[in-house]
Image (spheres, rainbow, N blue to C red):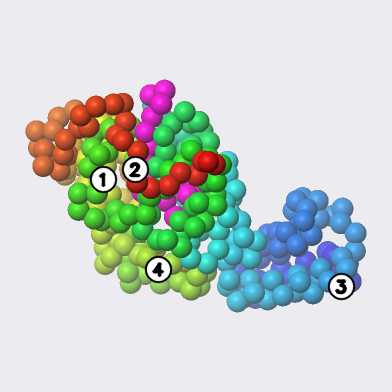
Amino acid sequence: MTLRHVIDAAAAQLAEAGIDSARYDAELLAAHLAGIERGRLTLLESPGEDLLARYRDVVTERSRRVPLQHLTGIAAFGPVMLHVGPGVFIPRPETEAMLEWAMSQPLSERPLIVDLCTGSGALALALARHRPAARVIGIDDSDEALQYARRNTAGTAVELLCADVTESGLLPELDQGVDLVVANPPYVLDDIALEPEVAQHDPPHAVFGGGDGMAVIAAVVGLAGRWLRHGGLFAVEHDDTTSSQTVEMIASTKLFEDVQARRDLAGRLRFVTARRSGDDSHGDDAVGHAPTSGRYPHPLAGESGADD
């Protein structure tokens, strides 16, 4: 049996299992096991029995709705490739629109950037690669997710911190010292039915955001209002049904201006951006106090991905 016939059969098996991207997945799994790029599959000679056996096994796993990225161990996100697997949220193409927005913003020469709910470190790593002079901090409360983030950011200057973004008064040393806050928090409504890849394999703690999907977003908005310097920028992803609620939540703090709902690459309302205003008259208690010295707050008691 030729490789083409094997892939055809695998694609049919995956399609029968309800996978929309059946052909793509079948080809990608074959390329992954063969150690070549997907576009070079036609150049591959007839596969050996060992490769065929392993291929049938991974196709069977995929037909059981195990995520493709768990089977390959990697996920593409914008300009970076990430190690992923059980225990960490798989970065989605929807978030790449927010990444593109963040990369296009004018920031200072050495900005301080914070990625909340960093998970695999996707946004933190991509932004650090884009702005080598920046100080980039990724925060997550999952030790398991941070294991992947450490691996992904190894050899970079990204700092990782295990902390709960809903904790009151988190990291006051960052108050009014941050140039950009980005966040892809858990925001799916609790009663939403999800595809098996998400429902059975993504960590629920990284997916669901309460009955209205806004529980963690509210905490993230509060941190951005407190941490951002005047003129600092904020972007937060949300469910495609909660754009107006997110806009209203940010605007109601009276700490932000230029609050805008923005669309993902598929055209769905997916994230909101805002600029920290210079008027704290409505939010002194929420904002806290600026650092007393230095361009940046002192280093956090976290971790850095840089080699020692």
Q: Which residues are magenta?
A: 108-123
Residue contact between numbered discs 1 and 2, judged by CB atoms under 8 Å: yes
Badge 4 amino acid: Pro
- Depth check, front residue: 212 or 75: 75
Q: Looking at the image, which residue is at 31% across and 26% down?
A: 295
| Circle 2 residues within 10 Å: few <14, some 14–19, many ≥20 | some
Query: Disc 3 versus disc 1: distance between alpha carbons?
Result: 56 Å
Residue on which disc 2 sits: 300
The first of marks 2 and 4 along the sequence is: 4
Please determine whether, in this image, residue 216 is positioned above or below residue 307: below
Residue on which disc 1 sits: 171
Instruction: Give the SS element for disc 4.
Output: helix
Residue on which disc 4 sits: 204
Q: Is residue 198 magenta?
A: no
Look at discs 3 and 2 and give the one toward the viewer: 2
Q: Quadrant of residue 228?
A: top left
Residue contact between numbered discs 3 and 2, judged by CB atoms under 8 Å: no
Q: Is residue 217 visible?
A: no
Query: Disc 4 versus disc 3: distance between alpha carbons?
Result: 39 Å
Look at discs 2 and 4 and give the one toward the viewer: 2
Query: Disc 3 versus disc 2: distance between alpha carbons?
Result: 52 Å
| Circle 1 residues within 10 Å: few <14, some 14–19, many ≥20 | some
The first of marks 3 and 2 along the sequence is: 3
Residue contact between numbered discs 4 and 3, judged by CB atoms under 8 Å: no
Badge 2 amino acid: Leu
